[in-house]
């Protein structure tokens, strides 16, 4: 619901449980009035009384201390010296932009964002969009502020379209989205940080005066920081307290943070990173910023996650596999690395089939001169030494086992030792006269060029057409450096990183629509590009190269802050673990991987009889419980960052099944008795655990008894509602 009250000058954006309100100050400036729990009474006209002129603050338009006001949009150049939502260099050398409100429109549904992934409305969804138009009259620039309200999802999305009706301008900052709060000084800021093999660790810090930010400058959303930020009450816990989350639907360089100014106002912001960004906007052209998804929850951090998880699973992810049950797969990477041939792959698949696995994914090494990771990328043709019968021959053998076949590509990259590079040395991201650096022996292809994008679509498309390939693992194993493009004129070189991402999106759009029956899984050295931009095209991501069960508990925990379990690729691998050398019980590895998109990444022919039995049972349970993990509501009961036992609880969509995953990962000698209090049950319903009955109120207020008597003794407890 979106309502505008002419008398009070207030726009009220309501979802089932939340309200977001914007007021027009003197019909000039859109002010952020409120975001939080749903308000029952309309906001009265008295909302304006609290704003006054601050000493030593420049007065914009002769009267507004914009440095202090909670603004919905704040370009650089006036009195507001905080992190700005926009800045540009104009043809007369000036850098000042000043906007005034011009008008509004309320429409049904949600407009598409040209060339960019975004949330979408489906038929029957209660979605409306408010567009506020702001204008800089001197420079003839218009700013359309889009607010789409997803009523049933308790979500608001925001983005900005910049329209230049004046002389050519060079855009420097198109951050676009900020939310300014008052009354939240004693809050914490949360982000997800890490590196390769330890992605998305939860960092929570008090908000202090000044600017606290995270960002990416390397051409991908990255493992260092995720394009997500949350502000929460200092005492907010997993299941209690106010939390505000912002997530960006974008896969490139981003900037996000919070700035607490001297007047108690917190500005939270998220968007394209202004660092090294430039965009020349000619007269009559427009620029669309990526969209931010905004979530408010009064049910703590898990409450925020449930809302993010749901909108992402249902209205960011698309295509056939959004709702369909996914595959239980085997991937040969950790089983063989580059040491394989057709027979070996078929042997691995056969054994996996015996335990119920339905998909064989052939990883790296099947193409061109790819003897190891120093050669071959870019040449998407089979290597006869490893695959004498081609991809179609191997695929047929796998299909004959009644299994699906999947294939690895790394289409955005090229090795210098490849035919592609020999023929097109200027197709890489590079700067004239400087030696391009290699990472893992490879360069990044320049996807800001249309010819490069066309090559990728046709080379990958040719292989997908050739055989019955039903799954693609789309890898990307390096960040950008020495950024530049051979095709762009000097004045446009600052556009390369954003143009690359637009090129990538166009490639993905073409391939995913040409091959709607293929399930695409994203990967970037594991989870180094895990964001909603990617999930729009590929509904799952290889969560991390780190397959150690203990580390994975943490990685999946952090990932679940925003992204649903349905998007997390999770595999059982061999021990000692190849990344960190730890040995964990086989059943623990299964119990940790089972809540994601489940699979194996080892040679089951080398497993003991007991391990095979455990694996078989895990596949059975995966088919039984997959829907609960992927489509149910997640309640994180205990964090692996502050306890010795992490606990996740899932409640199925129909509320009939509850799964409690208990992951003790360090042992307490002679441990005290432990009770795990459940969340979100029906107080007056009766639930059954192993034939024993308990009231919902008892399970939530007393809890289930748990004994931590054996290191790594993980459990998944199934609870059924009986009436
Ligand atoms: C990356 C991926 C791995 C695997 C290898 C293959 O590291 O993250 O899963 O596919 O590439 O080279």
Image (cartoon, rainbow, N blue to C red):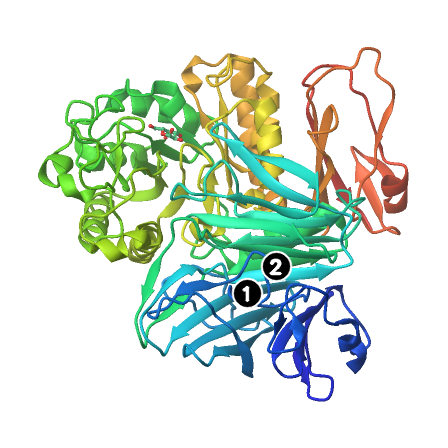
Q: Is the Cβ of the residue at disc 1 closer than 8 Å to that at disc 2?
A: yes
Badge 2 density bin: few <14, some 14–19, many ≥20, Cα 10 Å: many
Q: In what element is the residue under mark 1?
A: strand
Q: Where is residue 654 in the image (x, y as percent from the top left)?
A: 69, 54
Give the camera-side residue of 128 and 494. 494
Going by the picture, which residue comes out furthest to the left? Answer: 423
Badge 1 density bin: few <14, some 14–19, many ≥20, Cα 10 Å: many
Give the quarter of the figure containing the N terminus. bottom right
Say which quarter of the image contains residue 514: bottom left
Ligand 1, what quadrant? top left
Q: Mark 1 points at which residue?
A: 158
Q: In this view, does 657 lie above or below 76?
A: above
Give the camera-side residue of 225 and 359. 225
At 60% from the left and 16% from the top, the residue drawn is 585
Q: Distance between the residues labelled 1 and 2?
A: 8 Å
Q: In this view, does 81 lie above or below 219?
A: below
Q: Where is residue 170 in the image (x, y as percent from the top left)?
A: 35, 63
Q: Is residue 365 visible?
A: yes
Q: Mark 2 points at which residue?
A: 294
Q: In this view, does 398 lie above or below 302?
A: above
């Amino acid at each position: 619901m979106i309502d505008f009250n002419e008398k009070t000058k207030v726009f009220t954006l309501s979802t089932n449980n939340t309200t977001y309100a914007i007021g027009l100050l003197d019909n000039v400036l859109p002010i952020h009035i409120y975001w939080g729990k749903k308000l029952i009474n309309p906001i009265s006209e008295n909302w304006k009384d609290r704003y006054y002129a601050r000493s030593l603050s420049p007065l914009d338009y002769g009267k507004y201390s914009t440095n202090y006001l909670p603004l919905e949009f704040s370009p650089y150049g006036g009195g507001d010296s905080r992190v700005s939502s926009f800045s540009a260099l104009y043809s007369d050398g000036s850098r000042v932009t000043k906007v005034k409100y011009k008008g509004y429109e309320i429409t049904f549904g949600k407009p598409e964002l040209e060339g960019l992934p975004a949330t979408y409305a489906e038929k029957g969804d209660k979605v409306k969009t408010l567009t506020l138009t702001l204008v800089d009259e001197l420079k003839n620039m218009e700013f359309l502020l889009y607010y789409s309200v997803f009523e049933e999802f308790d979500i608001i999305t925001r983005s900005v379209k910049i329209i230049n009706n004046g002389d050519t301008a060079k855009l420097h900052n198109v951050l676009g989205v900020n939310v300014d709060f008052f009354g939240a000084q004693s809050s914490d800021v949360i982000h997800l940080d890490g590196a390769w093999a330890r992605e998305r660790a939860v960092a929570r810090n008090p908000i202090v005066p000044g600017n606290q930010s995270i960002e990416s400058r390397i051409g991908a959303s990255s493992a260092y920081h995720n394009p997500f930020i949350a502000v929460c009450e200092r005492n907010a816990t997993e299941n209690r307290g106010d939390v505000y989350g912002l997530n960006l639907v974008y896969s490139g360089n981003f900037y996000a943070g919070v700035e607490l100014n001297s007047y108690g106002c917190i500005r939270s912001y998220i968007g394209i990173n202004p660092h090294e960004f430039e965009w020349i906007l000619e007269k009559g052209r427009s620029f669309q910023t990526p969209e931010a998804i905004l979530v408010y929850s009064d049910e703590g951090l898990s409450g925020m996650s449930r809302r993010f998880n749901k909108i992402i699973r249902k209205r960011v992810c698309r295509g056939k596999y959004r709702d369909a049950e996914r595959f239980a797969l085997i991937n040969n990477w950790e089983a063989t690395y580059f040491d394989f041939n057709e027979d070996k792959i078929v042997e691995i698949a056969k054994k996996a089939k015996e335990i119920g696995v339905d998909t064989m994914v052939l990883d790296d090494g099947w193409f061109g001169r790819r003897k190891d990771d120093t050669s071959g990328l870019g040449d998407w043709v089979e290597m006869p030494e490893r695959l004498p019968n081609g991809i179609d021959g191997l695929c047929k053998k796998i299909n004959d086992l009644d299994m699906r076949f999947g294939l690895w590509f790394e289409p955005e990259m090229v090795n210098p030792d490849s035919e592609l590079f020999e023929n097109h040395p200027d197709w890489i991201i590079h700067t004239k006269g400087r030696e391009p650096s290699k990472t893992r022996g490879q360069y990044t292809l320049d996807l800001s060029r249309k010819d490069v994008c066309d090559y990728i679509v046709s080379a990958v498309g040719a292989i997908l057409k050739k055989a019955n390939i039903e799954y693609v693992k789309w890898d990307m194993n390096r960040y950008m450096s020495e950024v530049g493009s051979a095709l762009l004129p000097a004045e446009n070189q600052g556009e390369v990183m954003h143009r690359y991402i637009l090129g990538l999106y166009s490639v993905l759009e073409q391939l995913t629509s040409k091959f709607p029956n293929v399930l695409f899984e994203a990967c970037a050295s594991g989870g180094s590009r895990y964001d909603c931009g990617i999930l729009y095209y590929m509904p799952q991501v290889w969560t991390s190269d780190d397959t150690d069960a203990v580390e994975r508990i943490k990685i999946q925990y952090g990932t679940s802050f925003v992204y649903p379990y349905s998007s997390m690729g999770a595999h059982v691998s061999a021990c000692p673990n190849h990344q960190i050398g730890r040995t964990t019980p086989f059943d623990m590895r299964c119990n940790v991987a089972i809540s994601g998109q489940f699979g194996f990444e080892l040679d089951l022919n080398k497993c003991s009889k007991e391990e095979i039995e455990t694996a078989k049972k895990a596949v059975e349970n995966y088919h039984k419980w997959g829907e609960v993990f992927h489509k149910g509501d997640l309640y994180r009961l205990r964090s692996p960052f502050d306890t010795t036992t992490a606990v996740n609880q899932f409640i199925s969509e129909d509320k009939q099944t509850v799964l409690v995953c208990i992951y003790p990962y360090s042992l307490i000698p002679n441990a005290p008795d432990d009770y795990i209090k459940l969340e979100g049950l029906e107080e007056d319903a009766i639930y059954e655990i192993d034939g024993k009955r308990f009231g919902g109120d008892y399970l939530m207020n007393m809890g289930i008894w748990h004994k931590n008597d054996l290191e790594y003794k993980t459990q998944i407890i199934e609870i059924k509602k009986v009436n």
